[in-house]
Image: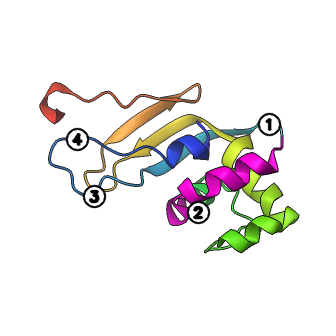
Amino acid sequence: MKLLTHNMLACHIKGVKNNYPFLIEATQVEARDADYNPDFLKHIFPRIDWPAFMQGAKSLKCADGLPETATPDMLDNSLFLQKFHHALLEVVLEEGALVCPETGRKFAVNKGIPNLLLQEDEC
């Protein structure tokens, strides 16, 4: 699971108010090459919740060189774009868990795929 995906997911357990962002428990992380497309990064940037992205990047140990806060003017900096690209699209959580920030419920991530299915009593 890439941090792009992580940034879009929330916990949907019934009654949970603090459902975003998931905490990440990583047991296996891999880096995979992805085509570098600065235009895509500039387009997706406004949709990224930066604090959630940074939390995920720190969990996956790929936050080096990324700022704690980011502004649109940083999109003109090629070094920033390369580091953003790497963390957002090339670092993959292969095995581990996503943890609901309110309940602590763990959702397994196996082979890069998060299983967010709820138990019957959580619906």
Cα–Cα span, label 3 and label 4: 10 Å
First in sequence: mark 2 vs mark 1: 1
Residue type at numbered disc 2: Met
Cα–Cα span, label 4 and label 1: 33 Å
Residue type at numbered disc 1: Ala
Residue at (59, 45) in percent of width and height: 4
Instruction: Point out residue 17 in the picture as x, y percentages from the top left corner.
Output: 22, 56
- Cβ–Cβ under 8 Å for marks 2 and 3: no
Residue at (30, 43) in percent of width and height: 105
Question: For residue 18, which numbered disc appears in the image?
Answer: 3
Instruction: Point out residue 28 in the picture as x, y percentages from the top left corner.
Output: 63, 38
Report the mark closest to the observer, 4 or 1: 1
* Element carrying mark 2: helix
- The quadrant of the picture occupied by the N terminus is top right
Q: Residues within 10 Å of mark 2 (few under 14, many from 20)?
A: many
Decide which of 94, 16 is in the foreground and name it: 16
Question: For residue 34, which numbered disc appears in the image?
Answer: 1
Instruction: Point out residue 74 in the picture as x, y percentages from the top left corner.
Output: 74, 71
Q: What residue would you read off at disc 2?
A: 54
* Element carrying mark 3: loop
Q: What residue would you read off at disc 4?
A: 13
Question: For residue 99, which numbered disc appears in the image?
Answer: none
First in sequence: mark 2 vs mark 3: 3
Residue type at numbered disc 3: Asn
* Residues rendered magenta in the picture: 36-55
